[in-house]
Every structure is written in structure tokens, then in C-alpha cells.
Amino acid sequence: MELKRFENNPILSPNPDNAWENFAATNPGAWYDEKEGKVYLLYRAAGDDFEHVIRLGLAVSEDGYNFTRVSDEPAFSVSEDGWDAGCVEDPRIVKMGDWYYVTYAARIFPPGQYWANNNQFLIPGDIPQEAPYAVRTAATISGLAMTKDFKKWIRCGRITSPVTDDRDVALFPRKIGDKFYMIHRPGNALRPEDMLDKHCIKLACSDDLLDWKESQALIKPHFDWEGGKVGANCPPIETPYGWLLLFHGVTREDQYYRLGAVLLDINNPRIITHRTPGYIFEPREWYEIEGPYNGVCFPCGSIVKDNKLFVYYGGGDKYIGLATCEMSEILDYLKSNPWTAGV
């Protein structure tokens, strides 16, 4: 089973008329507002500046395929001098009540042109050894923002540990029992014990959206296509058979980002009930294999519209593509692959 590319991909490309997005428009979060009949894409945007400051743009569609940018200005930008002053990127959107809750990855300094600098980030040369871990290393810290209209925002603050490089954060769209749940993917950390599940997908629960505890490994690399690293993509989607979660695996050989899926128990999301043994999507087209980061298909948002799954993904860290399938197809495929091996 494989997702099918939209024939008119990419659906969004860098906009040469806007300096803040003339280099990249990619990695979009998505939400379908059934009352309005509109699909919102909140996407990662960057210009061709040396610092490579990353902001979020907004586009909207009535059919889920054809999108129009809402403004010539960013919908959400970096703070002036805060912990997310360097970049805000890779948004994931859920809605509870009247509010959208957007998780995003951030750095205190802009990343610079990482594709040309071997992932060496722009850290000022006078930063002392006594400075906090995230300042000394330009580590990724994930944050939470709230909005009702993608115009006025409440910048809630940091949602992950300040001493761990942590990204791929997404909330579940409702409480389960009396707890909030969050998926995330830690990398390097200040404390060795925090790297025990490095590059694995973890699940945390909480009574408050800024205070996360009880984090445990949820998905570890298992199949060859998952390589040495897995990470979560879109917020989980509630289905009659459990929570549908898309994730990526990165192979050691070609470093390509390929997509798989799991079903999590509807009442206890720490339990994987079904898992795709093979990938369901991989980079093949020019807009996926030619970019600042070659060989990347990276969705941050998916929606269900007319019983069809729409997966909006970043291609090559530069473009936005769309892949689809019938919900019945992916659920039937998952149901034919029960999982009993734990994480």
C-alpha cells in the first residue's frame, strides 16, 4: 500500500515576491475546518538570507488541493529576543474547543544555511561555557502557541526540556481519560540518561499543556527502512480502530525520509496495536530529492475530508506536496498487520 501523489505537486513553492519565503515553503501543519469548509496550511517559510531565519506562513483552500496564500506577511514569526528568536518551524495543529493549539520547533539563534555548512549552526563566538545548554548548542526546543484565527497569537512558551534537543512534537486532539498526551522525538541532551531513547518516538502525558512528565519510548526503529532514527509526523487522527499516527524512518544508507504508520489503542495510546511493516511513501520526484535536504518527504499535517486522507508534506526542505489515500485503504492495511513486539 502506498499513498498517491497529487498530479499537480508541488502545491506550494517558494514565493519570489516575498523575501521571507523566497527560498523555502515547506513542512506544513494542516487543519480542516468542517464548518467553514476550508483547509488551513501553516507552513515553514524561509528566505535566501545568510542567517536563514524561519517563520510560518498561512495558505487556505476550499477543496484541499488548490491553495492560496492568505497574506504577504508571515502568520507567525520569531520573537524579538526570546528563546524562539532564531526560527519557528515544523508546526503541528490541533483544535480543542474554539482554540487552535500549535506546537513548533524553535532555536534561540537562526540556523544559518545548514545545507551548505554541514549542519553547523550560527552560534555567536562569545557565548560562555556557563550559558544554558540550549544557548551553547543552539539546540532545538519545542514550543506551544494558541490562536483562534491564525492572526492573534498567545505564545505560551517552551513545551519540552531546556536541556534536550527535542522536536517532532504533536499533541493528541483531545484528552484521553483525564490526561493530555504528546508525542515527541528527543536527540542530543545534556544528561546521558536523557539520551537512552535518542531518535525514538516518545509519548508523554500531563495535566497541563506546558508541564510534561512520564515520557516513555513509544516507537523504536525495527524494520530496515526505518534505519537508525524514527520521528513522529502529523498529530494523531482518531478512528474507530484506534489513533492513526504517521511517522518517518531515516535509513542509514541513503538518509532518505520514508513514511510509515501505526494504530495506537484508543484508550491507552502507549500500546501499539498495528504497524506497517514497509514504508507507505518515499522520495521519488524532483521536488523531494532536489533541495537543501535531499530525499525528504516530511509531513506535519494531515486531514480527513470526504473519507479520504490528505497528507501534506515538505519535499526536500523546500516545497510542499500532497499525497492521498482512502481512509479505508490505510486502515485495512494496518488492520492486516497486527503488532505484538512492543515499542
Image (cartoon, grey):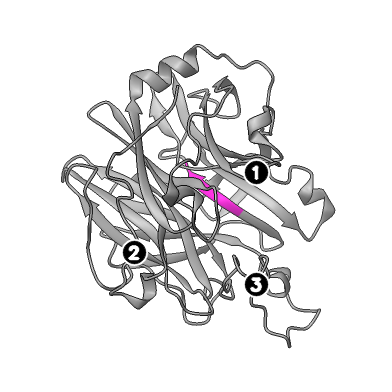
Whole-percent x, y for residue 193 in the image: 82, 49
Residue labelled with disc 3: 121
Magenta region, residue range: 167-171
- Residue at position x 78%, y 83% from top? 128
Helix, strand or loop at label 3? It is loop
**Marks 1,3: beta carbons within 8 A:** no
Q: Is residue 312 magenta?
A: no
Q: Please give the residue where the numbered disc 1 appears in the rendered image.
A: 254
Measured along the vertical axis of the image, is residue 102 above or below residue 21? above
Give the label on residue 57, or none.
2
Classify 10 Å Cα crowding around label 3: few (below 14), some (14-19), many (20 and above): some
In the rendered view, does 279 fall on the left or right side of 302?
Answer: right
Q: Earlier in the sequence, mark 1 or mark 3?
A: 3
Kind of residue sitting beneath label 3: Phe
Marks 2 and 1, how far apart in space?
Answer: 30 Å
Helix, strand or loop status at disc 2: strand
Q: Amino acid at mark 2?
A: Gly
Query: Can you give x and y, in whole percent of width and height, for residue 13 in the image?
Result: 34, 59
Q: Tell me the quadrant of the picture where the C terminus can be found.
A: top right
User: How many marks do you count on the picture?
Assistant: 3
Q: Residue furthest bottom?
A: 126
Element marked by disc 1: loop
The one of 211 and 100 positioned closer to us in this rendering: 100
Q: Earlier in the sequence, mark 2 or mark 1?
A: 2
As drawn, 271 above or below 94: above
The amino acid pointed to by label 1 is Asp
